[in-house]
Amino acid sequence: MQNDLISREFNDLKKAVYLLKASVKKFKPYRVRKNYSPVELEYYDSLAFRFEKSVELFLYFFKGLESYLSGTISDTLRDRLLFMQKLKIIDSIDFWIEARLLRNKAAHDYLPEQLKDIYQEIHKKAKSMIIYMNKIEHHMKTLKKQNPV
């Protein structure tokens, strides 16, 4: 049962990162002085949404994986991230704290100067998240070999 749950969470995360990766490939820096049409802005809205969703699903997956492997759930995000770091799934706790803050910022800032920086940072972090996804996929394959169903 718990194995099915973590597999479902993993598959949801893979789908989200797949879409994020598609947005990253099409990235063009946001230009502050350009007057974007609604259609042109759809790409940036999509990028931000896919980033926000991916961050949430990574953090949700980390919670499920921690519960699956240890039988407990950390009281804080920092402790959960430390657990993921011990598993060598993530390198930096700060990266994920910053990604979460950026997710919140992307949802609430609308000034063009801020958007330019936000989209640039989303692009940079999203590329790193794709690399983290590769580590998670490797970890899940190893986990599956250890616990075949």
Image (cartoon, grey):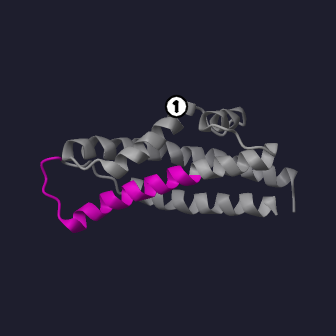
Q: Position of residue 47 (x, y in %)?
A: 38, 56
The residue lying at 41 percent from left, 46 percent from top is 104
Relative to residue 114, is residue 14 drawn left or right? right
Q: Position of residue 30 (x, y in %)?
A: 24, 49
Q: Determine the secondary structure under disc 1.
A: helix
Within the image, what quadrant is residue 86 found in?
top right
Q: Is residue 142 magenta?
A: no
Within the image, what quadrant is residue 70 found in?
top right
Q: Is residue 62 above or below residue 8?
A: above
Q: Which residue is mark 1?
A: 94
Within the image, what quadrant is residue 77 found in?
top right
Q: Is residue 44 magenta?
A: yes
Q: Position of residue 144 (x, y in %)?
A: 81, 55
Work out whether residue 119 can be spotted: yes
Which residues make up the magenta segment?
32-57
Work out whether residue 25 can be spotted: no
Name which residue type carries label 1. Asp
The residue lying at 33 percent from left, 53 percent from top is 27
Q: Residues within 10 Å of mark 1 (few under 14, many from 20)?
A: few
Front position in the image: 66 or 132 = 66
